[in-house]
């Protein structure tokens, strides 16, 4: 049986590798020596949800090095095929797996992506835009945001043509629980119950952020895989002791060696302007790299004997995760086909988000769940270094439900989940009135459940927030030639799921950078 399963997987890998080879991609290599010593107009650190559209956009005019600490997703059925949704989470290791596990100091297990495509290569693929209020709050241009969303959507996003049985039951359970109105299919973040878009196409194949790379100038993109950046290289110039990003230092991701390599930004002539090192390594990776580079709270850096480049106290601060409660619909694990979320309930003036899916717990067992998240938690945490090894997870604290307001909102959210669980729709799906006949838990019982079973929705953000670490153009305060463009800059998680907005952000900010370079084509901003 095991041999047959292995043969089946081997054939799948071969089939998918052949299919993937039909696409035209930029040059990709895992050989660090091919990149060491070379110079590029832009260096993007993190080939994930923001990094891929950003690199594609910048390559329209400039050479780009895209550095990804993980490997290629192409040829991997666990990542690419809908029927294997959730499987990458089951197969994790210290250095090479597409999903990397970590546990916050709160004791809550969590995950981060480690593959070309980032967390969007292993998530449920649910696609929903940010609210118009969010766009206005962060100061983006609404027309530019719309165009950037549409650029992404036209290439890798699909409207579902039907709902599988569990999603159908979940949708009606949300309506029965009072999450109204029913909005049908919508890309927008609107109150009520809706069907969202997805990164899985109608043939059940996942489309990745990396699929956006061919939209750029392939001759100008180099993708370095399986390489982990351990610091940004700076040089000091002028009498004002200005710090300017010059390049990056990196190591192999597989743990086989600690030998370091370097890549650099192209140095312009006196009439030209420089490009940037851009961190798009995610809410854990980007603040971690800043700290390892000597940018962060001085006292913390001194603990690890990291030479100080800039005492920027906001680095690692403002970390948030959306507290989540999950309710299991199956009384015990079944062997159902995995099913990512297709529908969302947006309730309580946008403060509660509810979704549902079928998640594998092993290769032959699944659980059916309804999950909720608090959209705007007050509780705030931090990220700090555990060591100077960039391949190791940093220390992350989220302080789940430390705010009384968050705890009260969790109780309200869990009541909503319990109402959905008692719906006729779910009774019909499970073939039993077991839940409908159970009394509702008391408020005290729900409060205790929130405290003891709080988990993650995997939408953590912060650590390099706008206004604290980066300015409105995503430039790191106090240094030149360094930006952060990813979810670590967010003060809240946008929409029901942040994937759509992080993808959009890569395109949107890439276009703004191109425009900046055009506007300053005869001015060197570093003089």
Image (tube, rainbow, N blue to C red):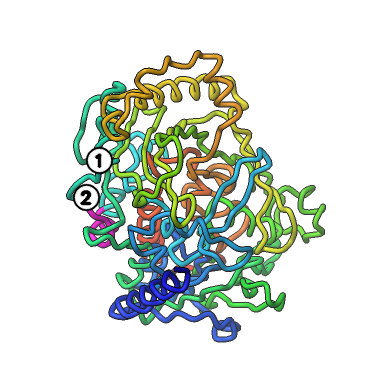
Which of these two is toward me, 471 or 178? 178
Which of these two is toward me, 101 or 477? 101
Question: Is the residue under label 1 in contact with that under label 2 (CB below 8 Å)?
Answer: yes
Q: Residue at x 63, y 73 (%)?
A: 254
Residue at the disc numbered 1: 195
Q: Secondary structure at mark 2?
A: loop
Q: Residue furthest front?
A: 1
Number of labels in the image equals 2
Identify the magenta region: 150-159
Is residue 152 one of those drawn in magenta?
yes
Label 2 to label 1, Cα distance in Å?
8 Å
Residue 338 vertical position relative to residue 217 in the rendered view, above or below: above
* Image x and y of residue 244, in percent: 62, 65
* Image x and y of residue 4, in percent: 42, 72
Residue 90 vertical position relative to residue 324 in the rendered view, above or below: below
Q: Residues within 10 Å of mark 2 (few under 14, many from 20)?
A: some
Q: Residues within 10 Å of mark 1 (few under 14, many from 20)?
A: many
Q: Residue at x 69, y 67 (%)?
A: 236
Q: Secondary structure at mark 1?
A: strand
Residue at the disc numbered 2: 160
Which of these two is toward me, 3 or 101? 3
Q: Mark yes or no: residue 349 visible.
A: no
Q: Main secondary structure of the magenta part?
A: helix
Q: Which of the 4 image quadrants contains residue 176?
A: top left
Q: Disc 2 or 1, which lies upstream in sequence?
A: 2
Q: Mark yes or no: residue 224 visible.
A: yes
Q: Residue at x 50, y 77 (%)?
A: 40
* Image x and y of residue 45, in percent: 53, 65
* Image x and y of residue 263, in percent: 59, 77
On the rendered image, what quadrant is the C terminus found in?
A: bottom right
């Amino acid at each position: 049986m095991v041999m047959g399963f292995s043969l089946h997987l081997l054939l799948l890998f071969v089939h998918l590798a052949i299919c993937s080879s039909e696409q035209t991609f930029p040059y990709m290599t895992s050989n660090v020596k091919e990149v060491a010593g070379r110079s590029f107009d832009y260096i993007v650190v993190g080939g994930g949800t923001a990094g891929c559209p950003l690199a594609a956009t910048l390559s329209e005019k400039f050479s780009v090095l895209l550095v990804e600490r993980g490997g290629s997703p192409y040829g991997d059925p666990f990542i690419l095929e809908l029927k294997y949704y959730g499987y990458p989470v089951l197969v994790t290791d210290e250095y090479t797996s597409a999903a990397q596990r970590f546990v916050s100091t709160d004791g809550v297990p969590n995950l981060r992506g480690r593959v070309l495509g980032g967390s969007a290569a292993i998530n449920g693929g649910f696609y929903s835009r940010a609210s118009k209020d969010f766009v206005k709050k962060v100061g983006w241009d609404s027309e530019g945001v719309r165009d950037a969303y549409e650029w992404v959507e036209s290439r890798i996003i699909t409207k579902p043509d039907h709902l599988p049985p569990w999603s159908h039951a979940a949708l009606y359970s949300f309506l029965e629980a009072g999450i109204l109105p029913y909005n049908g299919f919508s890309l927008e973040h609107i109150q009520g119950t809706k069907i969202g878009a997805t990164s899985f196409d109608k043939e059940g194949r996942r489309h990745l952020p990396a699929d956006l790379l061919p939209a750029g100038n392939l001759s100008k993109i180099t993708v370095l895989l399986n390489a982990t950046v351990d610091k940004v290289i700076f040089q000091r110039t002028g009498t004002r002791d200005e710090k300017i990003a010059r390049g990056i230092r990196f190591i192999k991701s597989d743990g086989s060696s600690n030998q370091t390599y370097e890549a650099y930004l192209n140095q312009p002539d006196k009439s030209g302007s420089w490009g940037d090192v851009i961190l798009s390594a995610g809410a854990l990776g980007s603040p971690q790299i800043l700290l390892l580079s000597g940018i962060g709270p001085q006292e913390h850096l001194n603990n690890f004997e990291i030479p100080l480049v800039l005492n920027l106290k906001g680095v690692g601060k403002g970390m948030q995760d959306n507290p989540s409660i999950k309710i299991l619909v199956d009384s015990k694990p079944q062997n159902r086909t995995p099913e990512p979320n297709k529908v969302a309930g947006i309730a309580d003036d946008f403060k509660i988000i509810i979704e549902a899916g079928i998640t594998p717990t092993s290769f032959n067992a699944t659980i059916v769940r309804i999950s909720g998240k608090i959209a705007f938690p007050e509780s705030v945490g931090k990220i700090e270094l555990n060591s100077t090894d960039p391949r190791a997870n940093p220390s992350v604290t989220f302080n789940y439900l430390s705010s009384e307001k968050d705890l009260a909102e969790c109780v309200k959210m869990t009541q909503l989940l319990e109402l959905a669980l008692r719906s006729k729709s779910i009774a019909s799906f499970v073939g039993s009135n077991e839940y409908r006949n159970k009394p509702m838990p008391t408020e005290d019982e729900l409060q205790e459940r929130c405290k003891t079973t709080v988990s993650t929705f995997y939408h953590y953000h912060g650590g390099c927030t706008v206004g604290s670490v980066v300015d409105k153009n995503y430039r790191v305060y106090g240094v030149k030639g360094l930006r952060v463009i990813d979810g670590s800059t967010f003060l809240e998680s946008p929409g029901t799921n942040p994937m759509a907005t992080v993808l959009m952000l890569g395109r949107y900010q890439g276009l703004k950078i191109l425009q900046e370079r055009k506007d300053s084509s005869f001015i060197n901003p570093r003089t």
